[in-house]
Amino acid sequence: MPAAAPAPPPSPSGARPLSPARKALIKLGLVRDIDLALHLPLRYEDETRIRPIAGLRDGETAQVEGTVVHSGVQQGARRQLKVLLDDGSDTLELRFFTFFPSHLKTLAEGAQIRARGEVRGGFVGRQMLHPAFQPAGGPLPEALTPVYPTVAQLPQAYLRRAVDSGLARADLSETLPPDAPPAPGARPLWPLRDALHFLHHPRPDVALATLEDKSHPAWQRLKAEELLAQQISQLESKRERDRLRAPTLAAARPAGGGLSLHEQLLAALPFQLTAAQRRVGAEIAQDLARSVPMHRLLQGDVGSGKTVVAALAAAICIDAGWQCALMAPTEILAEQHFGKLVGWLEPLLAPRGQRVAWLVGGQKKKERAAMLALVESGKAALVVGTHAVIQEQVKFQRLALALIDEQHRFGVAQRLALRGKGPGGLEPHLLMMTATPIPRTLAMSYYADLDVSTIDELPPGRTPIVTKTVVDSRRDEVVARIAAQVAQGRQVYWVCPLIEESEALDLSNATATHAALSEALPGVLVGLLHSRMPAAEKKAVMALFSEGVMGVLVSTTVIEVGVDVPNASLMVIEHAERFGLSQLHQLRGRVGRGAAASACVLLYSTGDSGRLGETARDRLRAMAETTDGFEIARRDLEIRGPGEFLGARQSGAPLLRFADLETDAALLAWARELAPAMLDRHPALARRHVERWLGSKSEYLKA
């Protein structure tokens, strides 16, 4: 992948400023020769042969050559230039709605012309609208003509010359070592130089389908190279982190005997841990006991019990005499964690003179000052909060464990800031949590620098959730279902979509829905929750819903994660077609937390077209067919690619340009096998390989 393009340097006095085309190249990240060589075509045009007009078929793109037998401007509702071309086999009309005086001269009667475009049937015979054209004669290309991804101010002709020039100058020497394992498949990998030259200028007899689906051997080499660069850089960053030192945290037994804090917490929990919770808890405890910083991702489906695993890890840390911090992306989610952790840990910490501290942005000055003092003194054994936890004025005495929930919502800089709160010379252990299960291929690639623990079973007592898709025109039936649920003493969520282009529109949508439901459900307290409400008001609304006083909660996606109300048994998601698959799954996980049968209604609108788009239809079908978070994640990866799972991690892990994690799993496995061998036995080749593909972007992976 090309290195991030630097901004053009200021021109020294008298120096010629950069042309628009050069600026456009920099904008595309095409700075080095190798960047240009790796800028591969989107598609190809076949300009290698001339077709007889008589043999052309409607809808195909073709190149013809002939004599202009008529040329003239037709006036009317829309002025146009009409040119009739004859090649001896038949005639073809060329039509131009935009043209210049030079066109009239080049396309004058008697001129010999070569034209290329899409063939259409017309009243007067075959036509081409706005074809590319040039004087006839001259040699035909011997290879297909590449069409490259580009931006404004960068014409294809200029870009083709720049790419050819970069391809000629770039160092394309081999970086794969001679002892590399054979690539998957029957054939060996093409040399890089041959693969690149072929992909920029493929022979006309190549099967175009193999170029389009990237199954051609030349594409296989490029994809193998890209995956290998990613694996080497991820493994290198992991090894660099492993050279850092962290506090060794082992659950300490009190001097006078008795139970450790970890054992006390286990005994005090009002439920038994699942086998999966015990397994991942042991993996984390093993990491904490080492002097190498833990860098672990804890993944588990909605409701699988990640918070209690985090609490047990915190207990080990506190037992060893250190502090722990938990950071969540929203105040609602942070407050949910805080409520649980205070309930579990505060009774056990109080006899030791310790507290659980609370840090969020909207705190009153006096409360915040008191919390900061507790953190700095070390009396706050555990600190829970939002981004406020990483602000400069927060001084930990002995931070040894950082817990980050919904880690994909935090960027590299934020994670680094929390890690930077550790004591001098020591790196805190880092446990990141996500309720969006990571598909296996994604864990093997973008998360290859992390150790991954998976909670793959739900606690007993969770009821299955029935999911139904309902068209918006049946909204009245859904409201009747809500009335029936509330009459039985149940509670209901109604989620409105976030319209990112207009926060005001988002708010009016939720407000209008709240008003409509309030009118349709007399005697039922209907609440409203959205991101622009003051924190105190949000807290009051959530308290009424949590306590069962409020029957229906109309909300934007602020309730996506962390809200735990066992009595809520129905989730209605309005305009479900606008949501991502993993987000729909997260929202659905807000119900089914108690003993009552629960349901999720995906209320969709077909809009003016009267039909759903293909992607929206695939999402809704997946939701109706399965409640398995890992299957949902697999389908989401299939539908949308890796970006959705990575979130803010995109700034820390370059997205693949050529390889596809689903179709190229065998190449990914090959790259995973070769990467450690290259770092161990061929470090110079490994460095050259990463520099070629990632340039400066490999630095981000160290976060």
Image (cartoon, helix red, strand yellow):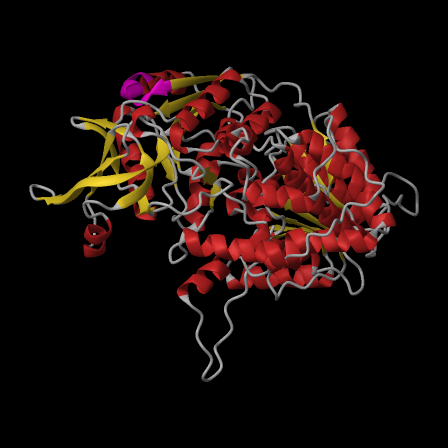
Quadrant containing the C terminus in the rendered view:
bottom right
516 sits to left or right of 633: left
Q: State the extent of the magenta-drawn residues as a range.
A: 470-477
In the depicted structure, whether residue 441 falls above or below residue 620: below
For the view shown, which residue lies furthest in the left direction?
76
Residue 613 screen position, x and y as percent:
37, 27
Q: Is residue 681 magenta?
A: no
Q: Residue at x 44, y 51 (%)?
A: 150
Q: State whether residue 274 is above or below residue 68.
A: above
Q: Residue at x 76, y 55 (%)?
A: 687
Q: Nearer the viewer, residue 359 or 630?
A: 630
Count of numbered circles on the image: 0
Q: Position of residue 94 (x, y in %)?
A: 23, 38
Asked if residue 360 lies left or right of residue 548, the reply is right
Which image quarter: residue 132? top left
Report if residue 475 lies within the magenta region.
yes
Q: Can residue 703 be seen from the camera position used here? A: no
| Residue 406 vertical placement versus 628 (above, below) | below
In the figure, is residue 165 to the left or right of 121?
right
Q: Position of residue 412 (x, y in %)?
A: 62, 54
Determine if residue 234 is in view.
Answer: yes
